[in-house]
Image (cartoon, rainbow, N blue to C red):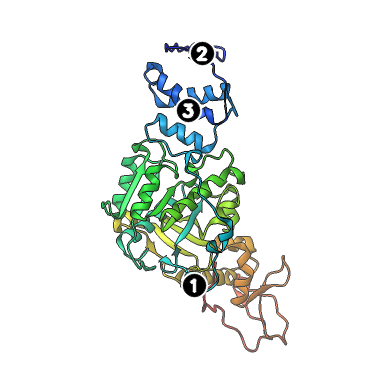
């Protein structure tokens, strides 16, 4: 494709084998690059073939690559150029800010003693669940992370307990940034959950409002200063200029931008991020919950893993805290998203406007009952089969079975009842029909199904 651009004081240059575009031949170095790019933009902004801002941005980046040293723009320069082209305003360059006068002999004013630090415990914006600070929700794609965070947003903006269980001390406004979703699609979700349409409680920016505003954009900074909101980044990686998620230095800009939002007045920054593909089916950890550099997890005050399970039409969301900093985390819990009623799949959000909380302890008791019954039915069942049947982490099977009065002498041995220390455990015996037969030497039998207590899994 060939595109001829007629503009004053420009010459025609060839791009590749079949595309020609005119541009100025200017050798630019250092701090002169951005003024030259702005001037070049002004001289070409009325050229018809560059009327599309995306084409203009590509053209100027190519111009910089061929005529400037260094050939690539810094993250701040890239944002400045993007905002200039798309009419979003240009952030002030640190180079033009007046230098602060620093007297290093007064270093004591920058330090604090123990008693000079702020008193009090960690501020919980949702009791027992969400602290102030930086919180990330991680999980595989399509597992419902956005729905869970929107349920959190509903609690914060309405003051109602999160999923009817975790109290909200005060209503806090939310600024929700979701550059991956259109306005119509996002509005449908907000309406289903009953998020209030009140500019003092909830504001958002979607794909429909234009290009992504980076976190150092003056509009974002001023909004945070004015309303002191909780800022949601859905997804967080869309606000990073890094080319490699695993590169700590490239992702430092995102961390610094989040810290700057907190310093500007944000009560909390909630990020939604993808987990590693290897985390599927594995026990949630901080390392496999957040994909990419470990610096993301290191900067967080709390990290939650979101997983989804489906059994006979019932869809549940499993929430596990994999990093609590300076607060007591909740036990892993489940939220019912869909149920099967009279053969029809029913969404709990469509029906009740939110998830349905599975009562604490109920899930643990159900799993213990299922585990005990499975071993009773077949004492030769393997750990892997028990994990699959009872939906329990394979690494927890042995300890749970021990609490229920069972153990394996060897990996290939059948499950045996645990007897008193003075007695030797005897293998479980099966009748011709497959039923378990108690050993004759067992004078004081232990309960077959000891189901009291709770497990943390």
Q: Are marks 2 and 1 in contact (CB under 8 Å)?
A: no
> Which residue does the image show at 57% across and 79% down from the upper left?
448
Which residue has dot 2 on it? 19
Q: Are marks 2 and 3 in contact (CB under 8 Å)?
A: no
Mark 2 Cα shell of 10 Å, populated few (<14), some (14-19), many (≥20): few
Q: Is residue 348 above or below residue 15?
A: below
Q: Is residue 390 among what the camera can see?
A: no
Farthest bottom residue?
A: 443
Q: Nearer the viewer, mark 1 or mark 3?
A: 3
Q: Is residue 362 above or below residue 278?
A: below
Q: Nearer the viewer, mark 2 or mark 3?
A: 3
Which residue has dot 3 on it? 35
Considering only order in the chain, which callout, 1 or 2, is on the residue closer to the N terminus?
Answer: 2
> Which residue does the image show at 48% across and 47% down from the upper left?
236
Mark 3 Cα shell of 10 Å, populated few (<14), some (14-19), many (≥20): few
Considering only order in the chain, which callout, 3 or 1, is on the residue closer to the N terminus?
Answer: 3
Closest to the observer: 209 or 445? 209
Q: Nearer the viewer, mark 2 or mark 1?
A: 2
> Which residue does the image show at 41% across and 36% down from the upper left?
90
Which residue has dot 1 on it? 365
Q: Is residue 104 above or below residue 379?
A: above
CA gap, disc 1 and disc 3: 68 Å
The x, y position of residue 340, in whole percent, is 37, 56
Secondary element at image label 1? helix
The x, y position of residue 28, in whole percent, is 56, 24
CA gap, disc 2 and disc 3: 27 Å
């Amino acid at each position: 494709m060939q595109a001829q651009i007629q503009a004053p004081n420009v010459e025609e240059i060839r791009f590749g084998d079949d595309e020609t575009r005119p541009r100025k031949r200017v050798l630019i170095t250092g701090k002169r690059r951005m003024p030259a790019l702005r001037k070049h933009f002004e001289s070409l902004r009325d050229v018809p073939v560059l009327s599309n801002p995306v084409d203009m941005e590509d053209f100027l980046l190519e111009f910089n690559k061929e005529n400037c040293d260094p050939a690539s723009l810094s993250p701040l320069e890239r944002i400045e150029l993007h905002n200039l082209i798309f009419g979003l305003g240009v952030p002030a360059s640190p180079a033009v800010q007046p230098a602060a006068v620093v007297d290093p002999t007064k270093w004591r004013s920058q330090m604090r003693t123990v008693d000079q630090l702020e008193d009090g415990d960690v501020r919980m914006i949702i009791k027992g669940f969400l602290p102030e600070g930086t919180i990330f929700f991680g999980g595989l794609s399509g597992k419902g992370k956005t729905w869970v965070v929107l349920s959190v947003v509903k609690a914060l903006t309405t003051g109602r307990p999160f999923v009817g269980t975790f109290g909200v001390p005060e209503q806090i406004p939310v600024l929700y940034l979701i550059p991956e979703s259109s306005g119509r699609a996002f509005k449908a979700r907000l309406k289903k959950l009953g998020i209030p349409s009140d500019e003092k409680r909830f504001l958002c920016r979607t794909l429909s409002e234009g290009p992504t505003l980076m976190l150092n954009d003056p509009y974002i900074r001023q909004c945070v200063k004015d309303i002191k909101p909780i800022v949601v980044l859905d997804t967080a990686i869309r606000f990073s200029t890094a080319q490699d998620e695993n590169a700590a230095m490239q992702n430092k800009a995102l961390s610094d931008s989040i810290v700057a939002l907190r310093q500007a007045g944000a009560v909390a920054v909630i990020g939604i991020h993808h987990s590693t593909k290897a985390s599927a089916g594995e026990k949630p950890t901080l390392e496999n919950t957040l994909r990419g550099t470990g610096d993301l997890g290191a900067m967080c005050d709390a990290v939650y893993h979101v997983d989804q399970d489906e059994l006979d039409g019932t869809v549940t969301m499993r929430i596990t805290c994999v990093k609590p900093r300076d607060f007591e985390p909740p036990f892993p819990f489940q939220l019912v998203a869909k149920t099967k009623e009279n053969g029809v799949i029913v969404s709990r959000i469509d029906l009740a406007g939110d998830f349905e909380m599975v009562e604490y302890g109920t899930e643990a008791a159900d799993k213990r009952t299922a585990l005990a019954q499975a071993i009773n039915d077949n004492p030769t069942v393997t750990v892997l089969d028990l994990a699959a049947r009872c939906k329990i982490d394979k690494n927890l099977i042995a300890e749970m079975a021990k609490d229920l009065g069972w153990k394996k002498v060897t990996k290939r041995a059948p499950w045996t009842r645990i007897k008193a220390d003075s007695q030797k455990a005897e293998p479980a015996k099966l009748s011709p029909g497959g039923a378990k037969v108690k050993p004759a030497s067992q004078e004081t039998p232990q309960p077959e199904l000891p189901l009291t207590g709770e497990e943390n899994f």
